[in-house]
């Protein structure tokens, strides 16, 4: 009888053992696990600490007994493999509790030992209030410390996925949390503006973020940083990465790869033809550029476990490489990445470009629409999509999976532009954010509408010294804009063309990139200029500035709106001294509504009526305008006074105000003027 031995009993190992049994009822399968638990949900550990998951037992997926009953697999926990005799095909073990020694035979061996958290050589890293998180025992230790010692302030060392999940978890347990990241921004795997989105969420919940700085000493009640500052802290979590568990493989003489992982071929076979390997300990090929990489993620580990099992039984299933698709939710904010980021693509020598769009995850007119951000990274020569990133409060996961599918299938930006995605008003838009990103990529790549991402701007601005045009509405411009940017929306471009010198480089931006594209095309049709649009607009500029700033451009940071950990809802106060647009707009709204309540129905004084929604009106309005939304116009017709009264109506673009004009004229009003959009109104003012 063939004997297959699996060393490691969590993600890859447990999956391999189950797959082996499904493939063969005759093979003898044995699993050796050095720890006390097998097949537990290690990705769920932070959520138990934060009490999103209330039941500890729900994290336990299998036990040695259940595995034996369900799969007829022999499982030995607390059993550490200490030596492999490749010639005799024997594995020597020792029980970590009893010190009992055993020897196991194998015809094929699958190594799935995973990895362990990196412990940096920092003074104080072994103190009792310093933790890592990798196993159920680690989780229990953290949970017990919080319950028994009642720490007040925690420092997370490392701003990666686990570090940020734990930052949220500890904040939910009532601790004041600081995150320390040695790289320029948190989540170094993503491009800066996506890290900026997550950083804004952390700050909004009152967490502190320290970047470009390392930990020098961990003390009993503080953490000293290498810039000389100190953070009060009576609890510390180290989360700076994972190293593969390779002692056994190295001692056995198995070949180690260039990235420090165990070397395997496409069959997941090691340098010994009888030994396969899977999971966090191995080195694999990246699906995009075929470079050797280590990707310690649960998804790839499980797939590799299945393939290793199949091939150990004589199969020929080739592992196609990994994209490293990963996603994180921090409080309510979600960020994900697949394939290569823009910086990773360029570092790999690929002639790559990227575009970013911000679009509602379902139609704006259906209640509950949230903005989702999509970035496509593509090869400029072939048009192939080689990576992508998404962010938002709703819909980011769905878009990331689409991009992952495109990258895996080596699809192009043109393919994504033409795909029909599922659409219904509560569920999507006729042109999804993925379509819009693909359109934008086509426009950039063809030269039809040149654009640059925030990380590309400093170099270009330094070289071109462009005229910078802010094409948003005047209210958001006045609240904050790029230093030296001129306010010039497309609605009044023809009247202000003298402001644009012929032949001069021009940089345009709006809130999300769409209106900037329109302005770019308008300028190109009038003036022979080198015009470039900021991909993602001011939203992307803000997030990039938050994450790591600019060296040439000066972008003021908007105030952070505080959120409650209990409800995750914005509070009234902003975490800044300067007032926000919402606060200013709300004041204007109250004033205008008061004017409406004491309507001058008995006078013939001219009035200006804003027929936008109250929410739009709150963002800024024409001075002394009255807000009567179009939907309320007929039921509030008595507020307009005499039929001969001069009434000017306006909205965002002039479309709704044209409908308002028609309604009023049908009601007998004889002196109604459509003032058009808010920008035209403000310009005439």
Image: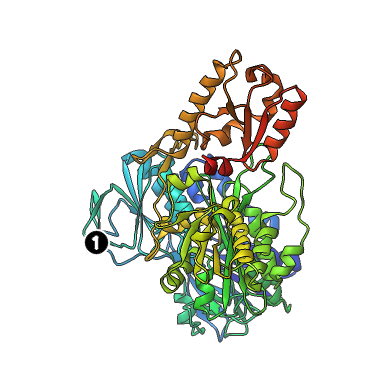
669 up-or-down from 37: above or below: above
- In this view, the residue in front, 540 or 525, is 525
- In this view, the residue in front, 338 or 672, is 672
627 up-or-down from 15: above or below: above
At horizontal 49% and vertical 77% (from top left) the residue drawn is 347
Asked whether residue 282 appears in the rendered view, the answer is no
Q: Residue 604, how many percent across, how many down?
A: 60, 19
Helix, strand or loop under label 1: loop
Q: In this rendering, would 391 be left or right of 164? A: right
Q: In this rendering, would 658 be left or right of 370? A: right
Residue at which label 1 appears? 227
- The quarter of the rendered structure image containing the N terminus is bottom right
Q: Residue 197, how many percent across, how many down?
A: 48, 53
- In this view, the residue in front, 109 or 591, is 591
Q: Residue 73, how many percent across, how many down?
A: 65, 62
At horizontal 63% and vertical 51% (from top left) the residue drawn is 359
- In this view, the residue in front, 394 or 674, is 674
Q: Residue 373, how many percent across, how many down?
A: 58, 54
Asked whether residue 658 appears in the rendered view, the answer is yes
């Amino acid at each position: 009888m063939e004997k297959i031995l699996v060393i490691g009993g969590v993600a890859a190992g447990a999956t391999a053992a189950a797959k082996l049994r499904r493939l063969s009822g005759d093979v003898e399968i044995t699993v050796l696990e050095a720890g006390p638990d097998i097949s537990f949900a290690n990705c769920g550990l932070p959520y138990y600490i934060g009490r999103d998951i209330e039941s500890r037992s729900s994290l336990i997926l299998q036990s040695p007994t259940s595995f034996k009953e369900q799969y007829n697999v022999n499982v030995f926990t607390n059993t550490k493999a200490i030596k492999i005799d490749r010639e005799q095909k024997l594995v020597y073990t020792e029980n970590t509790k009893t010190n009992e020694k055993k020897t196991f035979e194998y015809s094929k061996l699958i190594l799935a030992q995973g990895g362990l958290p990196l412990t940096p050589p920092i003074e104080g890293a072994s103190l009792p209030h310093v933790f890592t998180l990798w196993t159920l025992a680690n989780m229990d230790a953290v949970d017990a410390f919080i319950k028994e010692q009642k720490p007040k302030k925690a420092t997370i060392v490392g701003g990666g996925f686990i570090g940020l999940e734990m930052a949220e978890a500890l904040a939910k347990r009532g601790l004041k949390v600081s995150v320390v990241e040695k790289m320029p921004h948190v989540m170094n795997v993503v491009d800066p503006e996506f890290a900026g989105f997550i950083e804004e969420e952390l700050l909004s919940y009152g967490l502190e973020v320290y970047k470009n700085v390392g930990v020098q000493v961990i003390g009993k009640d503080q953490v000293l940083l290498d810039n000389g500052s100190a953070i009060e802290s009576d609890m510390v979590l180290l989360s700076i990465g994972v190293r593969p568990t390779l002692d056994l493989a190295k001692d056995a003489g198995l070949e180690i790869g260039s990235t420090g992982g165990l070397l395997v071929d496409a069959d997941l076979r090691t340098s010994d033809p009888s030994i396969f390997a899977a999971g966090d300990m191995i080195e694999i090929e990246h699906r995009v550029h075929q470079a050797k990489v280590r990707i310690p993620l649960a998804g790839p580990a499980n797939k590799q476990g299945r393939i290793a099992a199949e091939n150990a039984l004589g199969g020929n299933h080739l592992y196609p490489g990994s994209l490293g698709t990963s996603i994180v939710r921090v409080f309510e904010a979600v960020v994900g990445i697949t394939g290569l980021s823009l910086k990773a693509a360029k570092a790999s020598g690929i002639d790559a470009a990227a575009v970013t769009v911000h679009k509602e995850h379902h139609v704006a007119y259906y209640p509950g629409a949230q903005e989702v951000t999509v970035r496509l990274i593509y090869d400029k020569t072939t048009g192939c999509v080689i990576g992508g990133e998404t962010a938002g409060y709703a819909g980011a996961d769905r878009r990331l999976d689409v991009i992952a599918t495109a990258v895996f299938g080596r699809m192009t930006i043109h393919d994504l532009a033409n795909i029909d995605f599922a659409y219904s008003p509560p569920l999507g838009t006729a042109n999804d954010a993925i379509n819009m990103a693909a359109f934008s990529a086509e426009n950039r790549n063809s030269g039809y509408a040149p654009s640059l991402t925030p990380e590309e701007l400093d170099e270009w601005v330094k070289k071109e010294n462009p005229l910078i045009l802010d094409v948003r509405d005047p209210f958001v411009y006045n609240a904050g804009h790029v230093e030296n940017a001129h306010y010039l929306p497309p609605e009044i471009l023809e009247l202000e063309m003298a402001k644009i010198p012929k032949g001069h480089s021009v940089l345009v931006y709006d809130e999300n990139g769409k209106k900037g594209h329109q302005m770019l095309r308008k300028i190109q049709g009038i003036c022979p200029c080198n015009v470039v649009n900021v991909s993602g607009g001011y939203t992307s500029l803000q997030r990039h500035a938050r994450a790591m700033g600019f060296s040439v451009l000066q972008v003021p940071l908007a105030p952070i709106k505080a959120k409650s950990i209990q409800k995750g809802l914005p509070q009234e106060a902003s975490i800044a001294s300067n007032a926000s647009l919402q606060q200013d707009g709300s004041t204007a709204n109250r004033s205008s509504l008061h004017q409406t309540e004491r309507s001058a129905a008995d006078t013939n004084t001219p009035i200006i009526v804003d027929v936008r929604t109250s929410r739009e009106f709150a963002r800024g309005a024409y001075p002394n305008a009255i807000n009567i939304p179009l939907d309320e116009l007929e039921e509030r017709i008595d507020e307009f006074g005499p039929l001969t009264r001069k009434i000017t109506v306006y909205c965002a673009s002039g479309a709704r105000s044209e409908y308002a004009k028609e309604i009023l004229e049908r009601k007998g009003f004889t002196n109604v003027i459509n003032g058009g959009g808010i920008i035209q109104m403000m310009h005439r003012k």
